[in-house]
Amino acid sequence: MSRIHKFVKDLAETRKTPKEIKTMVDTAFEVNSISQSQIYRISALVMAGRTLQTRRARTEKEGPYRRLY
């Protein structure tokens, strides 16, 4: 997981809105490095109580016919 993804995950755990997270990421990293849709996806995983690693492990088990979110 990259630093930006970890930063977004930490902010999502503190119940920040995706718009607030996008503003903070753009300010902190000074590059347009993560899209709003990626922030929404990470926030949804955090709210569902899952991590990016568990999602990745589950999709690897499903094989080539995995679900696309």
Image (tube, helix red, strand yellow):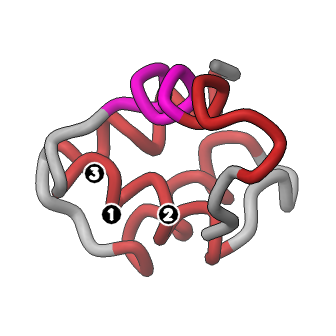
Q: Is residue 14 left or right of residue 65?
A: left
Which label's residue is closer to the chain start, 2 or 3?
Answer: 3
Q: Mark 2 vs mark 3: give the one in front.
A: 2
Dot 1: what SS? helix
Where is residue 7 drawn, in percent x and y?
47, 33
Q: Is residue 46 left or right of residue 58?
A: left
Q: Amino acid at mark 2?
A: Arg
Residue 53 lies within the magenta run? yes
Residue 24 lies within the magenta run? no
Which is more toward the observer, 39 or 61? 61
Where is residue 8 drawn, in percent x and y?
46, 44
Check residue 41 in the rendering and tell me which mark sits there, or answer none: 2
Please give the name of the residue rendered at 68% of the width and 51% of the height, measured from the top-left corner. Answer: 66
In the image, residue 64 sits, relative to residue 35, either above or below, namely above
Please give the name of the residue rendered at 61% of the width and 36% of the height, measured from the top-left corner. Answer: 62
Separation of residues labelled 2 and 3 (CA atoms) = 11 Å
Q: Which residue is mark 3?
A: 12
Looking at the rendered image, the quarter that the N terminus falls into is: top right
Q: Residues within 10 Å of mark 2 (few under 14, many from 20)?
A: some
Q: Which residue is mark 1?
A: 44
Q: Which residues are magenta?
A: 51-58
Which is more toward the observer, 46 or 30? 46
Which label's residue is closer to the chain start, 3 or 1?
Answer: 3
Where is residue 12 drawn, in percent x and y?
27, 51
Which is more toward the observer, 30 or 39? 39
Asked which quadrant contains residue 36, the reply is: bottom right
Separation of residues labelled 1 and 2 (CA atoms) = 5 Å
Q: Residues within 10 Å of mark 1 (few under 14, many from 20)?
A: some
